[in-house]
Image (tube, rainbow, N blue to C red):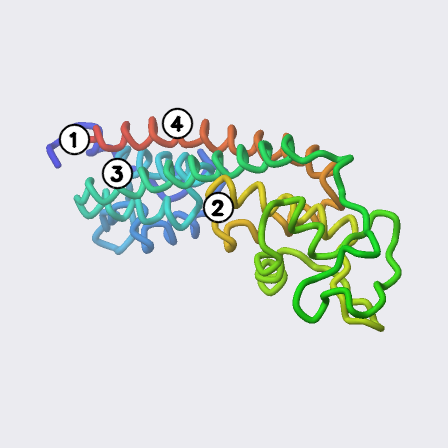
């Protein structure tokens, strides 16, 4: 680090803290965590800081909204250790995660558009599961918008075994008829199966689909979820802009010498 006349200016912990509404203890904690460079100590042991520390603090606080506290801390530690390459790699990884989140949002939006609200299969007396649910026994009673694994699999053009796999990992939750043991898919189960099918066609793994199905269920269905997608998109946009702000502050700190 080259000499800089501004670095001869001495600041107290309270001077750094006041600018951002922090406590002096927070400033000391940031230094101990490696977010700030080590302070200069007076002969009596008091910490003194410089404009360099002020720029480091601004960079960290600007990085947090876009990258999170843990990653922002790792970035600042790397910079203060002289490992700029690692710091930039961490920044890149956050951008990759943001891109993945945008693609996930787009996949959900696309899947919702592809779902036909009026296309839910209805049950028929001959449409039963395969194997032990082959229709030898009398078909169970179903509601007006319920169906069995066979018709649903045929509608989605997948094997019944695929639906059972989705059931085992919790993506689809058919009920069991108490008398026959047949799987009966109500409207919500059909919805989850169709959404899973669309996301699988988009290349998503089952473990990636699980949290999206959970969001649909917690939202109370597809229609409420559509409203939450706008908020999701707004949060991603805010995160992207925060990353730009953080990048500018980090660059200002990198230009410190």
Dot 1 lies on which element? Answer: loop
Q: Quadrant of residue 12?
A: top left
- Marks 4/1 in contact by CB < 8 Å: the verdict is no
Q: How far apart in space, not on screen, are marks 2 and 1 (Cα)?
A: 46 Å
Q: Quadrant of the C terminus?
A: top left
- Marks 2/4 in contact by CB < 8 Å: the verdict is no
Task: Identify which residue, 152 or 55, lies in the foreground.
Answer: 152
Horizontally, is 228 left or right of 79 in the view?
right
- Marks 2/1 in contact by CB < 8 Å: the verdict is no
Q: Quadrant of residue 197?
A: top right
Q: Which residue is mark 1?
A: 257
Residue 27, how many percent across, how many down?
39, 47
Q: Residues within 10 Å of mark 4 (few under 14, many from 20)?
A: some
Q: Which residue is mark 4?
A: 244
Dot 2 lies on which element? Answer: loop
Which mark is drawn over residue 204? 2
Q: Which residue is mark 3?
A: 88
Residue 148, how many percent across, how many down?
75, 56
Q: Quadrant of the N terminus?
A: top left
Q: How far apart in space, not on screen, are marks 2 and 4 (Cα)?
A: 29 Å
The answer to which of marks 3 and 4 sits earlier in the sequence is 3
Task: Identify which residue, 225 or 31, lies in the foreground.
Answer: 225
Which mark is drawn over residue 149? none
State the residue at coordinates (53%, 32%).
Answer: 106
Q: Nearer the viewer, mark 2 or mark 4?
A: 2
Q: How far apart in space, not on screen, are marks 1 and 3 (Cα)?
A: 18 Å
Horizontally, is 31 left or right of 18 in the view?
left
Q: Nearer the viewer, mark 1 or mark 3?
A: 3
Dot 4 lies on which element? Answer: helix
State the residue at coordinates (18%, 45%).
Answer: 83
Q: Nearer the viewer, mark 3 or mark 2?
A: 2
Residue 170, how many percent across, how many down?
62, 61
């Amino acid at each position: 680090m080259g000499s800089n006349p501004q670095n001869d200016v001495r600041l107290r912990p309270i001077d750094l803290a006041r600018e951002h509404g922090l406590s002096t203890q927070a400033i000391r904690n940031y230094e101990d965590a490696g977010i700030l460079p080590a302070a200069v100590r007076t002969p009596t042991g008091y910490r003194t800081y410089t404009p360099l520390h002020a720029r480091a603090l601004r960079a960290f606080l600007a990085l947090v909204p876009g990258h999170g506290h843990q990653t922002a801390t790792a970035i600042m530690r790397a910079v203060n250790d002289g490992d700029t390459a690692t710091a930039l790699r961490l920044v890149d990884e956050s951008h990759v995660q943001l891109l993945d989140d945008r693609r996930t949002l787009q996949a959900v939006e696309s899947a919702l558009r592809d779902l036909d609200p009026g296309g839910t299969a209805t049950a028929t007396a001959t449409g039963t599961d395969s194997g032990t649910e082959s229709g030898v026994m009398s078909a169970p009673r179903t509601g007006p918008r319920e169906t069995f694994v066979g018709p649903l699999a045929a509608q989605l053009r997948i094997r019944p075994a695929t639906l059972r796999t989705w059931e085992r990992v919790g993506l689809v939750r058919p009920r069991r008829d108490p008398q026959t043991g047949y799987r009966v898919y109500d409207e919500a189960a059909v919805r989850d199966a169709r959404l899973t099918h669309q996301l699988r066609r988009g290349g998503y793994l089952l473990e990636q689909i699980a949290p999206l199905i959970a969001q649909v269920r917690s939202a109370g269905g597809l229609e409420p979820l559509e409203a939450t997608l706008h908020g999701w998109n707004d949060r991603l946009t805010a995160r992207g802009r925060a990353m730009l702000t953080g990048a500018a502050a980090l660059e200002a700190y990198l230009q410190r010498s």
